[in-house]
Amino acid sequence: MPTPAFLDKLNATASPNARLRWVCDHPFGRDRVARYELGNGLTVLLLVDRSAPVVSYATWYRVGSRHEKPGKTGLAHFFEHLMFNETEHLAAGEFDRKLEESGAESNAATWLDWTYYYEALPSERVGLAIQIEADRMAHLVLRQPQIDSEREVVSNERRMRVDDDPDGTANEMLYKLAYTTHSYHWPTIGWMEDIAAYPPADCEAFYRAYYAPNNATVVIVGDIKPQSVLAKLQLAYGEIPPSVVPAEDIVPEPPQLEPRTLTVLKPTTNEKIFVGYMGPSLGDHDHTPLNVLAEVMSGGRASRLYTTLVTEREVASEPRCWAATFRDPGIFEITATAREGHTAREIEQLIVSEIDKLSSELISEEELERAKARLELNQVQSLETANGKAEQIGFYETVLGDPSAAFARLDATRKVKREDIRRVARRYLVERARNTVYLLPEVTHA
Amino acid sequence: MPESHTLDRGTLLVVESAENVPLVSLVIALRTGPAHDPPGRLGLARIALRMLRRGTTRHSSQEIDRRIDLLGAELGVDTSSTSIAMHGQVISRNFGAFIDLLADLLANPSVDLAELERLKRETIAEITESLDSDRSLVQRAFSRGFFGDHPYGRPGNGTLATVANITQEDVKQYYATHLVHGNVIIGLSGDVTSAQGLAAARTLSDALRTGSPLGDRVGDPPMPNGRTVWFVDKPERTQSQIVVGTLGTSARDADHHALVVANAIFGGTFTSRLMREVRSKRGWSYGAGARLSLERSRHAFAMSTAPGMNDTGPCLALMLNLYEAWVDKGVTPRETRFIQKYLVRSQAFEEDTAAKRLHLAVDVELLGLPADYYRNYRSAISAVTPDAASEAVKKRLSTDHLVIAISGTASDTLDAVNLAVPNLAATHVLPYAALG
């Protein structure tokens, strides 16, 4: 790792925005993540991993669909698309050409709480990622033709993921039903009528507010030389001024006092059910046991829902549970597809019955150990590649402010007791906090 | 590079060690796959391999499922046309116990009738539910139109009718014929030493039946006849899925790498011709790409997009124009230099984990690729000239004989589709529910 003398040398002639300081090291399994900060507020997290001659370079912005307003939904995601267009230094298409010429893969993702961009490059090409990410953080060019073309692309993405996909439609409706005041109410891709209407001025304002060093974290994992990388980062990002990030204006979701239901008709072959119980945020102490509970319910063929719905009664396929990993309280999702001749209502009764058991009886020690072993496997699998490590670091830094939280959560998972599972079932999986979307085949109900 | 050993009775072992993550990946691959399923029993290979974890003479299906979870392991089945594999991962401290469990699955399958019938009903439900996926529908229509009765057209899942036909005796016979020493490749990668891998492979090999490689009796599929549209009709689509293809490449072709280079220029990257014209300039589709599938015999070239309903006709016409121009005029030196850099440098991401390196080594065996296919990949790609790439496209890819598969709503888009295809020989409309 760089010495204080090296940083002194880098900072000798640096402007205040470009001054680089080491903040701390975070343990990350058997490795350590080094945290640095530039004077303009850019957070840099470095992890040296020499297992392959590659580098993962990820830029996480603390902006997602939670920061949008009604009538402008989907803007964060739309912006993710615009970021691959023209900059003051790169003509349209040059961004991708330069990366591809280097053998790099690049993509991006937007969700409720964040947006991130990544490049996976051969390690000797890391300088290119630094250069072009810094360029598009400060020098993006927004022109009407690109906005119009990208609007069509995003409309087609929405048709593919939502409008022509029964599961996508039902999932969107579940969040619309569960959240009444919070901005998690609308889908990250946005409502179609909003996608059709973003004016360029909105795009420009969004860019100036949220795409700035003080609203971003750069995560670099791979076969790197830290001193060389830090020098390049300082040069590329050091002169970018911080922005005034708008204060969040989010209305918390009030407690849900009664269950809600919605029926959606689609040309689908089977009835489906999508249930969402209002649950805790990712940072809440209860999230870890609820995550274990999700494994007990639907992790693997020996799980409770799989055993009941698929193996014993043969009434459904693919039961899935997920404790949402959001910054604000998320929902505990349960989904299943009814087999031919069976109904979503029938599945619902069986799901509720299994939840009642979790609330009234302790699970077995073996069930708990199975769930913990599966979660440990998931964690180890996520660390196989540089990209996987970078994603873990960036996600937990952005949502929880702790790049090594994945390991802390694994430690907490190991300490979960059977009583914790019953406690969180009683607290969160209650009827008054239940939201249910029934997706029914259109032909039989038109 | 992975180590290979041929065990005493003919089972091949491939091991790639890397200690950076406490995880072991495993593959037990068969040199036969759905293409070798008997007619009337399509789906047998996949059902048979899935039945392995549905009970042994020592343990019930539920006991096996619980054991896999307790070990921090997972186990699944993957199919391609001419091979099928069980693949798994396990936390490395439980590697030995996982191998013991797998040896029991291989040596002592009970093929319990009730479990088999349950699995068949599960599979039938999966086939029915996959009708919700328009991308799955268009792929099935393409496969039906392109391969017809050729074994490469046999779906790994089987069909509603053929899965129902599969019997206990079929599964037992499958094990006796296919799950034999010479037909199996065992691959191990990750936190496992060569010695540990060899010991584990011997344990697994001892659990197999005696037998030789079955040999691949599948020849090249025929060239499609003329230009035909296979339209999957589904109500209320706001978007169409389009796949257009013809006969493609074989890894044994002298011009194989030249065609790989040309294909990448046409539709293999985000800045490819297809992506640039369809998505970047017109915004007609979220994605657009072209692919050369590799199998033991020649397989398909296919290009795909997903335009909105109103853009379907113009988008299909554009795809055909771009394709014809590519075949007719070839590629430029500038495009070739650019894509060679991409293909050579990005190969690092095909080899950046032990599991990926193992996968490539196993692929060489399963697909019958030249032994040095991946080792020489970079130099072979670098040696392609623009003229060679252009000649390969012209020689291998037909503009006259194309299968054009589309899923959409016929009342909204079929007329536009038919108008967009010059010299159209025939149009087949398939109700989407008929593709189960």
Image (cartoon, rainbow, N blue to C red):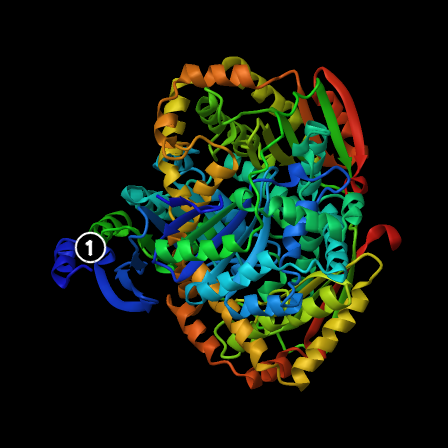
In this orientation, does residue B63 appear? yes
Task: Tell me the chain of label 1.
Answer: A
Q: Which residue occupies 64% across, 44% down? A: B177
Q: Is residue A368 left or right of residue A446?
A: left
Most foreground residue, A262 or A356: A356
x then y, percent, for residue B74: 54, 60
Mark 1: which secondary structure? loop
Q: Is residue B21 left or right of residue B123?
A: left
Residue bearing mark 1: A15
x then y, percent, for residue A139: 36, 43
Instruction: Place residue A436 in its image quadrant.
Output: bottom right
Q: Is residue A430 left or right of residue B88?
A: right
x then y, percent, for residue A172: 66, 58
Q: Is residue B432 left or right of residue A23?
A: right
Q: How many marks?
A: 1
Q: Which residue occupies 22% across, 62% down? A: A21
In this orientation, does residue A384 appear? no
Most foreground residue, A181 or B138: B138
Q: Which residue occupies 71% across, 18% down? A: B225
Eyeballing the image, is B151 above or below B87? above
Eyeballing the image, is B367 above or below B161? above
Q: Amino acid at mark 1?
A: Ser
Eyeballing the image, is B369 above or below A113? above
Eyeballing the image, is A151 above or below A413? above
Quadrant the N terminus of chain A occupies: bottom left
Most foreground residue, B40 or B429: B40
Structural crowding at the residue carrying mark 1, measured as other residues with C-alpha within 10 Å and reported as few (<14), some (14–19) or many (≥20):
few
Instruction: Place residue B416 in its image quadrant.
Output: top right
